[in-house]
Image (tube, helix red, strand yellow):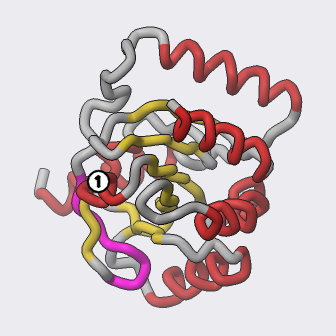
């Protein structure tokens, strides 16, 4: 199989996995908490939950971004979202506010647009840019590529999915589903106080 065919297949598989859109009903919140706790059990404190958080990608404005971005803040929240996902879009205004409320060296947010690939047509990029602007989510948003998929997204089965990552690239927690700003703030402050 040619390299381009392998990459296309990888993106097709990723798109199929990310077609779920997680909401936040009470039942889903409980299921999410149970899932998070189960995911945390095998790893002891300080171990990475993902195989590797090393990546090279491009943001929606065409700038190169690598995993060294994690070293720029004590805590990074990586929010994986999709243009079709209403729960994702509903929580993004709160995330935009949170990104502005903390000092950049303390806390930052990075979005990964799971259904917009590097090299996407201009219409697709314009739609994603418009959604980012409409929701006030003025933080860095990365376009999906093989490097991001293999480093962070290979186990993602629904959007939104959010990772908390420390300055060393260690995944501290994974949250499946959306939450209100106040719930995110509580979680963020908990990590920053540790």
- Residue in front for this viewpoint, 168 or 144: 168
Residue 160 against residue 30 in the figure, above or below: below
For residue 110, side relative to residue 29 (left or right): left
Name the secondary structure under disc 1.
helix
Query: Which residue of the protein is positioned furthest toward the front in this rendering?
Result: 193
Q: How many marks?
A: 1
Expressed as whole percent of the image width and height from the top left, the position of residue 32 reads: 69, 26
Q: Residues within 10 Å of mark 1 (few under 14, many from 20)?
A: some
Expressed as whole percent of the image width and height from the top left, the position of residue 7 reads: 24, 56
Residue 13 against residue 134 in the figure, above or below: above
Q: Say if residue 113 shows up in the picture.
A: no
Q: Say if residue 162 shows up in the picture.
A: yes
| Region rendered in magenta | 55-62
Query: Which residue of the protein is positioned furthest toward the left in this rendering?
Result: 2
Picture residue at 33% right of the left edge, 46% below the top: 167
Which quadrant of the view contains residue 27? top right
Residue under circle 1?
Answer: 71
- Residue in front for this viewpoint, 129 or 69: 69
For residue 12, side relative to residue 134 (left or right): left
Which quadrant of the view contains residue 119? bottom left
Picture residue at 60% right of the left edge, 43% below the top: 188
Picture residue at 72% right of the left edge, 46% below the top: 178
In magenta segment, residue 60: yes
């Amino acid at each position: 199989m040619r390299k381009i065919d392998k990459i296309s297949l990888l993106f097709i598989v990723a798109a199929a996995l990310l077609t779920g859109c997680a909401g936040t009903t009470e039942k889903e919140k409980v299921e999410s908490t149970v899932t998070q706790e189960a995911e945390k059990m095998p790893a002891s404190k300080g171990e990475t939950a993902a195989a590797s958080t090393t990546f090279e990608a491009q943001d929606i404005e065409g700038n190169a971004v690598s995993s060294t971005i994690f070293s720029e803040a004590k805590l990074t929240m990586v929010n994986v979202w999709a243009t079709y996902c209403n729960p994702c879009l509903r929580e993004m205004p709160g995330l935009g506010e949170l990104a502005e409320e903390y000092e950049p060296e303390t806390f930052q947010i990075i979005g990964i647009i799971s259904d917009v690939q590097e090299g996407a047509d201009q219409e697709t990029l314009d739609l994603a840019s418009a959604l980012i602007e409409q929701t006030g989510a003025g933080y860095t948003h990365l376009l999906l590529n093989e490097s991001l998929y293999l480093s962070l997204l290979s186990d993602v089965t629904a959007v939104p999915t959010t990772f908390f990552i420390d300055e060393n690239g260690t995944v501290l927690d994974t949250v499946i589903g959306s939450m209100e700003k106040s719930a995110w703030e509580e979680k963020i402050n908990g990590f920053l106080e540790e």
